[in-house]
Amino acid sequence: MAFLKYTLIRAALFVIPFVVFLLLGIGGVLSAVYAVIIAFAVSFLFLNRQRNAAASDVSDVFGGRKKVTSSREQEDAEAEDSIDEAQRRAEGEGGPAEA
């Protein structure tokens, strides 16, 4: 959720100056360049907490730390755990010899 919030804030920080510069008649390319610079500067200076929260959300999702939310996912996780434990027990009893 923090990632979505941060993305929407960044988009607004770009769109608002872009539209203002277009209305001032600066031109499309220069308006985009100026809007990017302003959006970057404002977000870098004032959105540190939101940026860190968004990075944490992304890290949780892609780092495998996202919590299981639905009952179906919980059942799947429990089934995987039981299969893994059974395989480890089988390997420990009759598995390859340890050096």
Image (cartoon, rainbow, N blue to C red):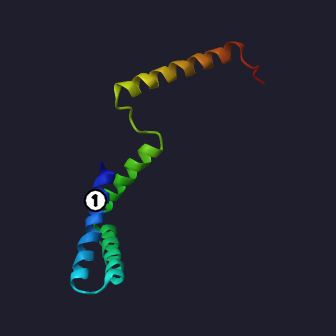
For this orientation, the residue located farthest to the top is 93
| Circle 1 Cα neighbour tier, 10 Å, few/some/many (<14 / 14–19 / ≥20) | few
Kindly state the secondary structure of the residue where label 1 is placed: helix
Q: In this view, does 92 lie above or below 31?
A: above
Residue 13 is drawn in which quadrant?
bottom left
Point out residue 55 in the picture as x, y percentages from the top left corner: 39, 53
Point out residue 28 in the picture as x, y percentages from the top left corner: 33, 81
Point out residue 25 in the picture as x, y percentages from the top left corner: 25, 87
Q: Nearer the viewer, residue 5 or 55?
A: 5
Q: Nearer the viewer, residue 26 or 34?
A: 26
Q: Kindly identify which residue carries mark 1.
A: 8
Q: Is residue 98 above or below residue 44?
A: above
Q: Quadrant of the C terminus?
A: top right
Identify the residue at image location x=30%, y=58%: 6
Residue 86 is drawn in which quadrant?
top right
Point out residue 95 in the picture as x, y percentages from the top left corner: 72, 17
Give, as a three-letter code, the residue at label 1.
Leu
Q: Is residue 91 left or right of residue 70?
A: right
Identify the residue at image location x=38%, y=35%: 67
Q: Nearer the viewer, residue 84 or 34?
A: 34
Identify the residue at image location x=34%, y=32%: 69
Q: Is residue 40 left or right of residue 89?
A: left
